[in-house]
Image (tube, rainbow, N blue to C red):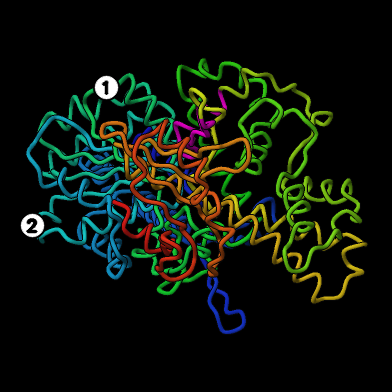
Amino acid sequence: MEDREIKQIEEQIRSLPKGSITVKHIHGREYEYWQYRENGKQISKRVKGEELETLRAQINERKRLELFLDSLRNSDTMQDTLSVVSENSPQGLIRTGDDLIRFTEPVRKFHKRELFPELSDYIYGPDNDRVFIMYGLRRTGKTTMIRQLILDMSPEMKKRTAFIQISPNETLAMLNKDLKILEKQGYRYIFIDEVTMLSDFIEGAALFSDIYAASGIKIVLSGTDSLGFLFAEDEQLYDRCFLLHTTFIPYREFENVLGIKGIDQYIRYGGTMSLGGVEYNKSQMSFASEKRTNEYIDSAIARNIQHSLKNYQHEGHFRALYDLYEKDELTSAINRVVEDMNHQFTIEVLTNTFKSHDLGVSKTNLRKDRENPTDILDEIDMTAVTERLKILLEIRNKEEQTVSISPEHVREIREYLEMLDLIRYIDVKIAGGSGSARKRTVFTQPGLRYAQAEALITSLMQDEAFRDLGIRERMRITDRILSEIRGRMMEDIILLETSIFEPENQVFVLQFATGEFDMVTFDSKNIRCNLYEIKHSTEIAQYQYRHLVDSKKLEQTEKQYGKICERAVIYNGENSNQDGIKYLNAEEYLLHMR
């Protein structure tokens, strides 16, 4: 037996996680933990969801290789056995046969995303020399869709299907060796998950299309480092791949796939396909808490950008962001953008001393409350509150940053967030003016935003003046603050989805000298428009539609955007009609968006 071949197997074993998965019963519920020893100490970490599945598979593969190596070392026919394995058997973490069937079974009862037919059409369609790429942020259904597709295959197709899970430290050369073996063995449908973990993926991605897809094999690549796929598509896979982006999950899919109903639930949890809601376990949702949200921002967004830039052009594409990356301050910058999603995306967001936009707006609105106005927020120690909020959100002020934030930093961060499909922009136009007054920044994952709003309330509850209030008054004020936040977020959601699903129309906010229309949809081809107010309320009141019946505003709008075909208030109550103004239920409105 050659030492080189033994070392190859030993290196594979070292690249895989050690330890085991154990189940603990706490208060009648089961929780999985990854347990292993490090420097003589027993380490125990809670794992769940896709991370648990991946970790379990990698630990099982490590154990299989360890047993195999032991059997080789103790066998008289060691040399012959190793030769067969190294030349004719794939060495990576590959699922075929019964193992593949067991891998797909857990998703049998899951509903399918609306994107699923695009994946299915590729697999069952004609050969075309192209690979299929599914990319998007973590927990947006990529691996689940692959498992669902394999589950639906005929027995004959399953026999020719392999699922490859890329492991840390694996290289394109190692994967290529496995693909050659699978091709010789007659496999024709190959799914490669987390392929962007390969450090040399971006530079060598043409291998998948030019060698394997060109020979009639259907290759599906998936991964969470979306930026890496976009870089590869721009260079190595240009015109040789189909791209399917999974990050944006509209309200309709949130309700239909996860079984979670209600716009407020979507505001609170929306943005991922994490198992939760009526059919699944809420505790697994990505935005169930502010802590988990910050972890998601770090792992799914900031690390995504960092990993892809590190592996693209030999770290030569960091551009102005390299100094932020080196000082570990890129995550902080992204956190600040998320918290200020309703602000203009400008340099001041990142460089000015942190100030909560939500808090300032809530102070004003509480003073103006029609039933129970209060100036309690004027008595609060605002410096202390915002400092606590800053700590909660792990945001560094300008004086705490070792690298000064420049306009170039801001421009590049905005560019990458757009490429990840995490942010989009809505025009805010001025009536009678030309062009847009500004752009309104909207995050496509509302739950990410709302979790940080809840952190604001946590900070407020620690204020001494606030704690002196009675419990009922505290609850009324905090409820009002969160209601204001949900109201503005509902506006963003409706503006975003309308702009996506009505691409033939311009969708924007229209501002006047006093007041505004929350949403205008303008059909420039037929010179006509619709006007909407968006209210987070179940009640009907005249002040909600006062702008929609203002003759001067209507006259000015028609002069600029043509005939007004519909005036409506989108709100949380039942469909109705009031003084000639339609009232549309927000959830029904979003469910009919196609």
- Whether 446 is drawn above or below 234: the answer is below
- Whether 294 is drawn above or below 507: the answer is below
Q: Sort mark 1 into few (<14), some (14-19) or many (20+) by Cα contacts within 10 Å.
A: few
Of residues 312 and 382, the one drawn nearer to the viewer in this rendering: 382
- Coordinates of residue 455 in the picture (x, y in percent): 71, 56
Residue 420 is one of the magenta-drawn residues? yes
Mark drawn on residue 238: 1
Residues at marks 2 and 1 touching, judged by CB atoms closer than 8 Å: no
- The secondary structure type at the circle numbered 2 is helix
Mark 2 and mark 1 lie on one chain; the one further toward the N terminus is 2
Residue 105 is one of the magenta-drawn residues? no
Of residues 139 and 48, the one drawn nearer to the viewer in this rendering: 139
Q: Which residues are magenta?
A: 412-431
Left or right of 459 in this view: 527: left
- Coordinates of residue 504 in the picture (x, y in percent): 29, 36
- The secondary structure type at the circle numbered 1 is loop
Q: Amino acid at mark 1?
A: Tyr
Hey, which quadrant is residue 543 in on the image? Answer: bottom right
- Coordinates of residue 351 in the picture (x, y in percent): 74, 28
Query: Residue tagged by mark 2?
Result: 156
Of residues 135 and 90, the one drawn nearer to the viewer in this rendering: 135
Residue at screen point 44% across, 64% down: 275
- Whether 260 is drawn above or below 420: the answer is below
Hey, which quadrant is residue 441 in on the image? Answer: top right
Label 2 vs label 1: CA separation? 33 Å
In this rendering, which labeled residue sits more in front, label 2 or label 1? 1
Q: Sort mark 2 into few (<14), some (14-19) or many (20+) by Cα contacts within 10 Å.
A: few
Residue at screen point 21% across, 28% down: 209
